[in-house]
Amino acid sequence: MKNRYIVTPKDKRAEELLDFNEARDHDLIQLVLSDSQFYQLDAFGVFSDLNNMLGCLIDDFEDDAITNKQQLEEGLKYLKNVRLKDDRIQELMEEIISLFEEAVKKETGVYFFF
């Protein structure tokens, strides 16, 4: 079983540390996805929609980041409008939304380590 991480640095310094793989847990806001959670979000098209909309590559066995403010805001708007039929996955979406909101507020980014 592989864990996948969605991470938002808490500030610019933490973002720089993350770029050099030196960030510590206290520097980051992290969401850990299980295989099941990842595949459920993927089945609902969440990652492919973000990829198509923002020109990124969020996929299994890929790492990518959204750091451009306009892209973060566009992604956030999309995520807020997604309504999933599964309550547990919708709760997970709320956590992802929170990461995007923090990234916009802190002027950092959202990093996907899959």
Image (cartoon, rainbow, N blue to C red):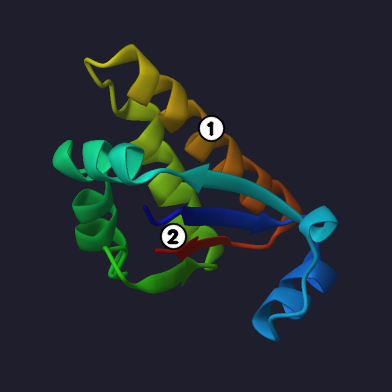
Q: Which of 66 and 34 lies nearest the eye of the viewer?
A: 34
Q: Position of residue 27 (x, y in %)?
A: 81, 59
Residue 21 left/right relative to 57: right
Q: Residue type at mark 1?
A: Glu
In the image, is 38 to the left or to the right of 34? Answer: left
Question: Residue 20, located in which quarter of the rendered image?
Answer: bottom right
**Residue at the location (40% across, 49% down)?**
74
Q: Which mark is residue 95?
A: 1
Rounded to the nearest whole Å, what is the CA distance between mark 2 and mark 1? 18 Å
Spot occupied by residue 39 in the image (x, y as percentages of width and height): 23, 44
In the rendered image of this protein, does residue 62 appear above or below residue 114? Answer: below
Instruction: Please name the residue shown 27% across and 63% down the image.
Output: 60
Residue type marked 2: Gln
Q: Earlier in the sequence, mark 2 or mark 1?
A: 2
Mark in front: 2 vs 1: 1
Where residue 73 appears, as percent x and y from the top left, is 49, 49
Q: Residue at x 77, y 79 (%)?
A: 22
| Residue 26 drawn above or below residue 77 | below
Residue 104 in the figure: left or right of residue 112? right
